Amino acid sequence: MQLRIARLCLDCDEIHDAQQCPVCASETFTFITRWVPAPERRSRPRPTTTPSPRADLYAALTDDTARSTSGRLFKGGVLGLTALGLVGWFMRNPKQPRSETSD
């Protein structure tokens, strides 16, 4: 059993790797790595790489394009909703005053 997935049942102190304790069927557990630190799996750290200038240029282009497109869509959407609201407001039937009739 790997240390990273080992669990300690808090009800019966059984060590297991399932969602439920196999002894008491409790779902109350804590990971063993809370008390026992798990060693790093890699024998050596990953090498750090510097991003290429082309990657920086691509990131800058895609970021600016997304902002300008979303800004245009937002402004267009607001203007469109405003226009629809005004057209609906002008096309509504005005309230006609009720005339009182006497019998």
Image (cartoon, rainbow, N blue to C red):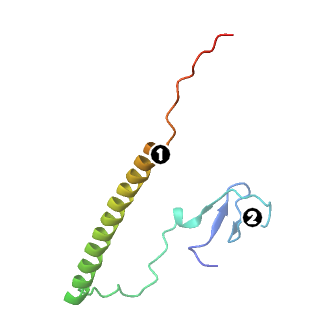
What amino acid type is highlighted by mark number 1? Answer: Met
Q: Toward the viewer: 7 or 95?
A: 95
Q: Residues within 10 Å of mark 1 (few under 14, many from 20)?
A: few
Q: Of callouts 1 and 2, which one flags the residue occurring earlier in the amino acid sequence?
A: 2
Seen in the image, is 23 located left or right of residue 79? right
Helix, strand or loop at mark 2: loop
Crowd around label 2: few <14 · some 14–19 · many ≥20 (10 Å): many
Q: Which residue is situated farthest in the top direction here?
A: 103
Q: Nearer the viewer, mark 1 or mark 2?
A: 1
Of the pair 89 and 54, the residue shown nearer to us: 89
**Which of these two is toward me, 91 or 69?**
91
Question: Residue 103, percent across and down?
Answer: 69, 10
Q: Which residue is mark 2?
A: 21
* CB atoms of marks 1 and 2 within 8 Å: no
Rendering coords of residue 44 (x, y %):
36, 87
Side (left or right) of 10 relative to 43: right
Can the viewer see residue 29 in this picture?
Answer: yes
The answer for how far apart the CA atoms under marks 1 and 2 are is: 69 Å
Q: Is residue 23 left or right of residue 54?
A: right
Q: Residue furthest front?
A: 103
Callout 1: SS: helix
Residue 29 badge: none
Residue at the spot 74% in from the left edge and 57% down from the top edge: 12
Residue bearing the label numbered 1: 91
Residue 23 lies, with reference to residue 83, above or below; the image says: below
The structure residue drawn at horizontal position 65% and vertical position 63%, both measured from the top left corner, is 8
Q: Is residue 49 above or below residue 85?
A: below
The foreground one among 45 and 83 is: 83
